[in-house]
Amino acid sequence: MDRQAIPVLTESQKMEGRKFRPSLTSRRKQDQTAGRVLFAVTLLPIALVTLITIGLAARFWPILKVYSFWDLVSGTVWKPQDGLFGFWPFISGTFWVTIVGAGLAIPPCILTALYLSEYARQSTRAIMKPLLDLLAAIPSVVYGVWGVIAIVPLVEKNIAPFFEKYLGFVPIFVSKNPTGYSILSGGIVLAVMIAPFIIAVTYEVLMTVSEGLRQASLAVGATQWQTIRSIILKQTMPGIIAAVVLGATRALGETMAVLMVVGNVPQVPRSIFDTAYPLPALIANNYGEMMSIPLYDAALLGAAFILLVIILIFNIASTLVLQRMLGKRWV
Amino acid sequence: MDAHIQIKNLNAYYDDIQALKDVNIELPRKQITVIMGPSGCGKTTLLKTFNRFLELTDKTSITGEVLIDGQNIYERDIDVTEVRKRVGLLAQRPFPLPMSIYENVAYGMHIHRMKNNRNEYRKAVRHYLEVAGLYDEVKTRLTNPATSLSIGQQQRLCLARGLAVEPEIILGDEPTSALDPVSSQHIEGRLLGLKEQYTIVIVTHTLRQAKRLADYVIYMYMGEVVESGPAKEVFNNPKQERTRAYLEGQF
């Protein structure tokens, strides 16, 4: 019906002879407004991420007019005073620490998730799950302190000498660094930090396997372990990989705990016992200082931009995979 | 009667709810036994005690004995995988394993290392697909994923997969309830053909299917076996009032 055809009536006239009130009462208006406001507030974080990305790119721009993007990314020397801005030590350092961390975390995390989803009783699960989730609530600076007190000395006094003695011929295990502040220390701390997250997501992925499928395998006399190996892992592999990648994106961006144990020397690492200087540490340590050096600001914000883009790409890719696997469960 | 499965003083519990109450029955060898009764009466629970599937659910417990050829499958030192190899299961709806049609049938045989070489496996896969009445439909695409089959075909594939580990007993938990009438008929036909070699136990809630398949009938109500006996006797001349009521459609 044509809207304009409705004549303007007073409140009492509107109600005359009608069972229901006309739709636009003040209550309804309130409801509509509330919906719109909530929507706007929800949009805010998305707008923020977009604006931050654009902002970083804009501040990165000045240095790109002087050096090409490729020169910056592949440059291995970082001497801002001399106008040398090579990002490669930081980019490679980031990946070294992340890969070591994820590598250490993957096997125990997957085994834990398998135990929880396949073997544990309901009651065991009810206790273990919250405990594991609790690990994620510990502040990263606490992990950093733990790393400095416990892990760095352990790497220095035990792990590095052991590897030097028995596996010294393998390039990535060569130890030239006399301190324990190293990629391995950073990796160990990271592994513990991302573990609860990888376990939780892997567990969710494993729970998507229907009970009927497990029983189909058990019904022909397979053991639980055989069922896990040939059915469950096979069925859920894409999801488990995505869970690990999602965990790795957390490791990529982790700043505090890593910065405290990794040594922070701008060099391209060659071994897990070398020091490294990941991107987040570079930014956190230097932004706001020595800003009078030309292009320094642009270089640091460029580093932030690169970090953000790397994390966004990994994060979006793994989230897409997980969304497909978990469907409605993934909220 | 030559009993293949004997059940003595069997009680089953979910947490503290009793699902089976003092069940004492015998199931005849190489015949089709149909367990019927209204939903929630314990049919499926009883069936799950035959291949020790009940223990897959948390907080279940059992007292009493389930004897297969005189041996209690709940004895301490019994290997549960051996029980499940000897007692196959056709589930309510098909669950093809995430692998090819061929690998689905070979799966159990591989697990138990039942054959010596590739050729023997190939022959066996073909044989059991034929027994399940599926071979002609899939022979040109054995390497396709099993999920590419129709639901009815998938259920026959599951039958072939179960038969391939050479069980003596086949359990069917409403094995046609998810299928269309033609596929159901197909499965029923296969089961009737298989009873010469296997002891078959089917749970069903459709009386007509029970009448088509059953040689022997168990009627359950509220966790108890009300009546059991040869199909003709129970259907034509039930001894218990409750059985009569069920057969006349009062549930």
Image (cartoon, coloured by chain):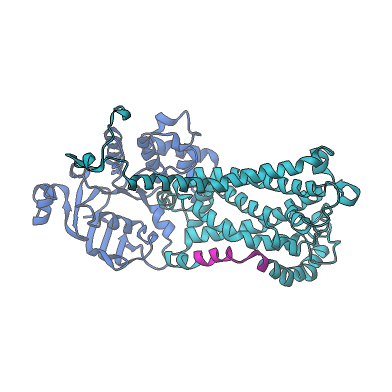
Q: Is residue B163 left or right of residue A134?
A: left
Quarter of image, res B224: bottom left
**Range shown magenta:** A129-142
Q: Nearer the viewer, residue A59 or A197?
A: A59
Q: Colour of chain B?
A: blue
Point out residue A321 in the picture as x, y percentages from the top left corner.
55, 43
Magenta stretch contains residue A135: yes
**Picture layout, residue B61 above or below residue B250:** below
Magenta residues: mostly which secondary structure? helix
Residue at image coords 42%, 37%: B127
Q: Nearer the viewer, residue B195 or A255?
A: A255
Q: Residue furthest front?
A: A10
Q: Is residue A187 left or right of residue A44?
A: right
Q: Nearer the viewer, residue A294 or B136?
A: A294
Residue at image coords 22%, 39%: A13
**Picture layout, residue A252 above or below residue A64:** below
Q: Colour of chain A?
A: cyan
Q: Is residue B2 left or right of residue B144?
A: left
Residue B118 visible from this viewpoint: yes
